[in-house]
Amino acid sequence: MMMSFNSLNYSTCTLTRMSSHHSHNRIRKNPALATPPSSIMSQTEENRNLPNSKENSPLDTASTRPDSAVLLTQENAVGIIGGLSIGTTLNFVNKLVTWSSKDGGNGLPFVLCSDPVLNKELSFHERASCSFLTGKSENLIKDHAPIVENLRHKRIFLEKSGARCIAMPCHISHSWHDEVAQGSSVPVLHMGECVAKELKEANLRPLEAGSTLRIGVLASDATLSTGVYQEKLQNEGFEVVLPDKATMEHTVIPAVEALNRKDIEGAQNLFRIALQVLLVRAVNTIIIASDDMRDLLPPDDPLLKKCFDPIDALARSTVEFVQSVERNA
């Protein structure tokens, strides 16, 4: 089932129930909604042009009465707040559907909010942080209240939609996780906590005798400066290793700039150097907390064996949480 709706002034919300077993046949019957299996259309600017019948829509009342809008009543319903990268959001959704459909499962019902306005706000915040680090002139966002308010509105909307937990597959959005989650009636999963929990359960051993377990974190300055991952990892007893200023200025930031210029080879070479700088400091693994860097190297690159994708941890933790809710229901 795929339906678009407008509620609480959100022009970019899509309700989707995805099943890896049945979605392909349903999609083929309606060419207007044709998408690849296990995928989702998350922007409703295009969806508004799709044929629909409001008089037959079960969401018509919910759309006009947001205070009573409970779109999903299942115990395993998930709310998703998209962020900086729609690609990362869809990557998360794909993993969520895939892992929840294992062993003959039907996948999870979910509500996804994807807002281009929020995307632009977060993108500007990240660019401004990089400009500040490199000394380039660009106005910094001094007041983050609009971003936080935007995220909070979406969290409230998802609660009213029937979500039993909320996930934000966006590194920068977690800078304001506590503010967004304040007053929530359902858990708002923290990506840093999900990562720290999985690494703790992995029973890693220090690479150097007598030393602590070291975990590297590679991310934009906007993400690193707020300590999204550092605090959660340190709480689990890990020593966090970050790229120094020289590495950020001469490899990480130039790699992103090369990627924006479509210089893929140059970006890959710089990214490999940044990874190697952290690896020589005896880290067990490197958390790639950057949307730009996540898919920069080919899947078979040996360096990726030493890396950890937080989106994986968030998806696994989300599936684990809702399955535990189902068992206790």
Image (tube, rainbow, N blue to C red):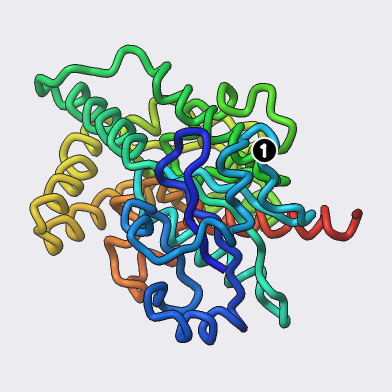
Report the front residue among 80 and 290. Answer: 80
Residue 211 in view in this figure: no
Q: What x and y, as percent, mark residue 327?
A: 88, 60
Q: Secondary structure at mark 1?
A: helix
Residue 14 in view in this figure: yes
Question: Quick one: which residue is furthest to the front in this view?
Answer: 55
Quarter of the C terminus within the rendering: bottom right
Q: What x and y, as percent, mark residue 280?
A: 36, 50
Report the front residue among 163 and 97. Answer: 163
Based on the displayed image, in which of its 4 quarters is residue 326 positioned?
bottom right
Quarter of the N terminus within the rendering: bottom right
Q: What x and y, as percent, mark residue 132?
A: 20, 21
Kind of residue indicated by mark 1: Lys
Q: Is residue 25 left or right of residue 82?
A: right
Q: Residues within 10 Å of mark 1 (few under 14, many from 20)?
A: some
Return the residue at label 1.
160
Report the front residue among 41 and 243. Answer: 41
Question: Quick one: which residue is furthest to the right in this view?
Answer: 328
Q: Is residue 163 left or right of residue 273?
A: right
Q: At x 59% / y 62%, what residue is drawn?
A: 56
